[in-house]
Image (cartoon, grey):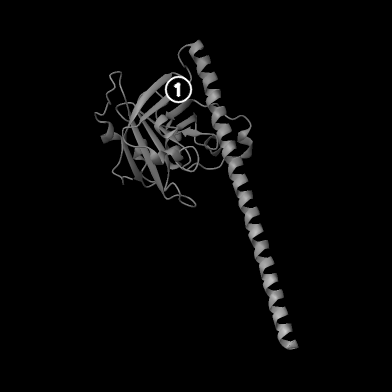
Amino acid sequence: MYRSGLILSGVTRLQHGSGAGWMRLELAFWILGIALITTYLAATATLENQRTQGIELFAEARATAMLAGPVANRPATNASARLQDRQAVVPMPISAGAIETPPLPIAVLRMDRVGLEVPVYPDISELNLSRGAGWIGGTAAPNTGGNVAVAAHRDRYFRPLKDVKVGDILELESLSGRGEFRVSRIVIVDPAEVSVLDDTTVPTVTLVTCYPFYFIGNAPRRYIVQAIAVDQSGKVSTSDALLTALPLGETP
């Protein structure tokens, strides 16, 4: 009888100890979850602040440009920049010394249906892509004709591209004015397929981000959204555009 009592007492202590251990483990998971949520919310708030600040800075620059008359200074283009940016659609980190005087945005990109409004900076450095989208050097400057290529991160400012559909309207506001474009094609290509950046015979906007959108690590492919200018009558200028702008690729 005495021996049975000792056994029952030991089992009870084990059960109590096991229960306390599970409670401590559950508490640890709760703390970790709260910490992760707090970090995510803080990062989201930072991105939103940077996006809003960039749009406000552009609005000020646009107002100044309108008072000053025609825009004299455009983003520089040359063969070296074209080759470098085409090979680096995935941007490389920049040195700490290069972030002392961050550049101002040169345009604002909007797609109302998917809730996209993002400042466009004059290159695709990691600094600029942490604050918005970046113009790919070597392509046409915003609203000057030809093919304007813009890149941004899939897990940040270009996440809404996953919901874009053919026919959606895109607006590109630059220092020289506004251009309206309609999405004509969406394709998925390999990173080596840089012909997507080729110049076009009609005003075109090409948006580039990595794919798949929820891939963990360096995403292996590129998600391309291309939009063709809409003229004053509301018609899309499509002659020769798709033939010169996009390679054959996988549609999403």
Quarter of the image that includes the N terminus: bottom right
Q: Quadrant of residue 22?
A: bottom right
Residue 42 placement (x, y as % from top left): 61, 40
Task: Tell me: 104 left or right of 212.
Answer: right
Residue 214 placement (x, y as % from top left): 45, 49
Q: Is residue 195 visible?
A: yes
Count of picture labels: 1
Residue 25 placement (x, y as % from top left): 65, 62
Front one among 46 and 190: 46
Secondary element at image label 1: strand
Front one among 186 and 135: 186
Residue 119 placement (x, y as % from top left): 50, 29
**Residue positioned most to the front:** 1
Mark 1 nearby-residue class (10 Å; few <14, some 14–19, many ≥20)? many
**Residue positioned most to the left:** 239
The residue singled out by tag 1 in the image is: 174
Q: Is residue 77 visible?
A: no
Residue at 73%, 83% (x, y): give it. 5
Quarter of the image that includes the C terminus: top left
Q: Identity of the amino acid at label 1?
A: Ser
**Residue positioned most to the right:** 2
Residue at 59%, 30% (x, y): give it. 102
Looking at the image, residue 28 lies above or below residue 156 = below
Task: Tell me: 11 left or right of 131.
Answer: right
